Image (cartoon, helix red, strand yellow):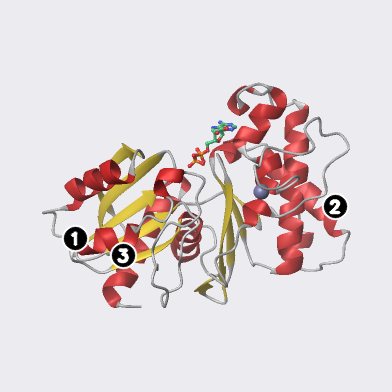
Amino acid sequence: MLLGAIEAGGTKMVLCIGDEEQHILEREVIPTTTPEETTGKILAFFQGKGIRALGIGSFGPLDLNRRSKTYGYITTTPKTLWRNFPLLPRLREALRVPVEIDTDVNAAALSEYALGAAQGFNSCLYVTVGTGIGGGLIAEGNLVHGLVHPEFGHMLLRVSSEDPMPDGVCPYHKGCLEGLASGPAIEARWAKKASLLPENHPAWILEAEYLAQMCANAIFCISPECIVLGGGVMRQVHLFPLVRARTAALLEGYVQHPRILSGMDDYIVPPALGENSGIVGGLLLAKRAFQGV
Ligand code: ADP
Ligand code: ZN
């Protein structure tokens, strides 16, 4: 059985055809331009390929309330052309297959939980640190949506007195995680591409501080069994030991569990599926759509 998956990002979309075992059989990347042009390319890719269902992990915010008239729409995105765009209904009507949609980070959380770094646990927090920051959560085996859906990227943090850009770059909030620790925040603060900053640059101590605050808050608030940190910024793998050590310091010994006390090497981890977390999550969503879960 063939399934379709889309990893819908603000700058590019990854399209893929796979099977029900999540093997990727065909893949194409297209730029995200206008909704009309982009959906045209998406339909051209999938039409006639015989997919039985489609799964979408998308940038948002999204309306994920199944009872809502605007279920599956992109809602208040700063990408104004995409505001209130009916992504799920448009693709479902054109392709005539069941479609399941979730946030890009929930799709990644789902794949890491089912097949990757969080396999065998009941809960998993997946956080991407890239152009933006977002978090997807599985708790007690279920994807968490809540009232709207979680927005980990806008968690408000304690700003470091060492930070030369204490307000951050988020147009909505001063001192939120995305505004302080996303790739563009690092680049605005140090006037250099994040990928070019050397390992001993103070940027990384500050970055680890903010990511550790997020991890500590997540541990206090939701107690996930595994925290997966992905996205472009986490290609700086030297961040992992810094984040683990600082998270432990921020917990101040208050949260006691062997997986936390043992240094967190297997607790705060990179995605086991690497760059494929999102698209494999899309294939898992497609399987759910087919099964009518
Ligand atoms: P997106 O979030 O757009 O889907 P990425 O997760 O790849 O894509 O994030 C892109 C951002 O990550 C870039 O803005 C850049 O700041 C940062 N980035 C990409 N590669 C690296 C790297 N090797 N080191 C540090 N930062 C990086
Ligand atoms: Zn914000």
Other-residue count near label 3 (Cα within 10 Å), few / some / many at <14 / 14–19 / ≥20: many
Q: Three-letter amino acid code at disc 1?
A: Leu
> Is label 2 or label 3 in front?
3
The disc placed on residue 229 is none
> Is label 2 or label 1 in front?
1
| 262 relative to 40 in the view: left or right | right
Mark 2 vs 3, N-terminal side: 2
Q: Residue at x 19, y 52 (%)?
A: 46
- Are dots 3 and 1 in contact, CB under 8 Å? no
Q: Residue at x 77, y 37 (%)?
A: 206
Residue identifier under label 1: 95
The disc placed on residue 249 is 2
Residue identifier under label 3: 286
Residue 30, horizontal then vertical, whole percent: 31, 38
Residue 49, horizontal then vertical, whole percent: 14, 54
Residue 223, horizontal then vertical, whole percent: 70, 69
Mark 2 vs 1, N-terminal side: 1
Give the position of the C terminus as an image quadrant. bottom left
Question: Does residue 204 appear in this view?
Answer: yes
